[in-house]
Amino acid sequence: MNTHSALKRIGPLKDSGHTRHAVRQMKRRIGAGLVLFALTLAASFLSLSLVQSRSQQSPYVLYRSFLHTAIAINRNYVEEPDNSFLFASAVEGIARELSGKVSFATAELIASASPVDDVRELNDAFVRSLQAVREQLHAANVESASIDEVIRSAIGGMVSGLARKHSDSYSYYLPPKKAKELSESLHNESFGGVGTYIEYLPEEQKILILGVLPETPAFEAGLEVGDLIVKVDGVPLADIPIDSPEAARDRIRGKIGTRVVLTIEREGVPTLLDIPVTRRNIDVKNTFKVSLTDSIGYIRIDNFTSEAPEEVKKSLEFFNSSGSDGLILDLRSNPGGLLDAAVAVSSFFLPPGKLITYTQGRVSADGPLHYKEYRAENHSLIWSRPTAILVDRRSASASEIVTGALKDHGRAVVVGELTFGKGSVQEIFPFDDEYEVKMTIANYFTPSGICIHGVGIEPDIIIPPDVIAAATDEDPVVKRAVEILSEKLDRPD
């Protein structure tokens, strides 16, 4: 299982660590007050005779997990949580789980507990709600529900409600099976799929294509950056239960060699397009380099995987030795990657110790939560010559960290479009029942204090989208970057 620091991410951004460390850290944050909660919980649980669990998991462990989840949200979520709303969302989650089996007065149950001001009151309200559910199930003589299902549905409802309230598609509940499948392919391993980077848009119930890898089924089928997937194999996404980005990704993936039909909306096209794509192994390629002129080198980074820094390092060393005086770093349509990779690549352009980015959560009485700085590594500076960075509206997360750092320190001129604006930090909280909650705990900031999330990085030189779209042969963004670097080289500071 991926671990505590490994699961601090920006979109696909992540770091590395150990799960046991995550559990220890979480328990420290919960603090001594949990002991009193646990005693209250045990007494409350003894009074409940909910329908017998069919699983081997202790119902007490499941019930305790609800409490731990509520505490983790209250102590860590990036926005101040509303416990009345959390309770209402938990009850609504139970109602959805028991739909068709039994109906109970959801609104009355929620109203009877209002207001819920803190975790203790949330815990008490949840105990009473379980008792009400027990009575309804008993009265209806229902035998098909279990305590596992009821409590897990409450946890899932609480987390999904929180995410909806704050339009946060990066926070979600992962039941045990999905938690085991969370480990992803950012370490450049081959995986089965079509070759796209995607972002699930829960409000619109669509999948946005952030990037299309070259020489992949998606590229060959004609899928484009900016396409919106609205159906998979003819089934509207609105009719498919998708509760996380991983679930959205799973709808597209499948057995190697099988075909999936993606129905898309494309800007400027009045009708939906059905595009069949055959799944196969996808090998992620990270970088590409070429000399544009005798004095200007070009490096494109498609994704910040663990291998990307070493590839960029070799390319920079090549351009140093070949006598290049300027460099274009192309991060267009780069959806992100590993935080470590973004820090390492930034370090190649900055003196040791320079601030690259920092994280900060909500501000508590004790100061900002989850504050952490990331600085340029020692002995890592390779390229100190003029640099231009190319970005567009699909450049996200790790791309924005690198762009923001080099822009703020005056190490690069940024050319292109306003970037995507994905700069939030997620952490995975593992619990006793082998489920996990992925939660947004902080946002990333540039060295000058600009919050990346929801804002993006504004270029120094903006190339309007209509100019880019109207280009036929020559790339107008690359052309402008070459002109800027050439002027700098002709008139050195």
Image (tube, rainbow, N blue to C red):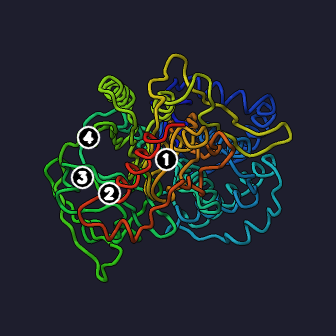
Answer with mark 2 or mark 4, whichever residue precedes in sequence: 4
Separation (CA) of disc 3 from disc 4 = 9 Å
The local secondary structure at tag 2 comes to helix
Q: Nearer the viewer, residue 477 or 212?
A: 477
Answer with mark 1 or mark 3, whichever residue precedes in sequence: 1
- Front tag of 3 and 2: 3
The residue carrying mark 2 is 251
Judge the density around disc 4: few (<14), some (14-19), many (≥20) Cα neighbours within 10 Å.
some
Q: Amino acid at mark 2?
A: Arg
The spot of residue 312 in percent (x, y) is: 36, 31
Separation (CA) of disc 2 from disc 4 = 14 Å
Judge the density around disc 1: few (<14), some (14-19), many (≥20) Cα neighbours within 10 Å.
many
Q: Amino acid at mark 1?
A: Gly
Relative to 265, 17 lies left or right: right
Taking 383 as reference, is 221 above or below it?
Answer: below
Q: Nearer the viewer, residue 75 or 481?
A: 481
Q: Amino acid at mark 4?
A: Phe
The residue carrying mark 3 is 194
Which residue does the image show at 75% across and 48% down from the upper left? 123
The residue carrying mark 1 is 11
| View extreme (right): residue | 365
The residue carrying mark 4 is 191
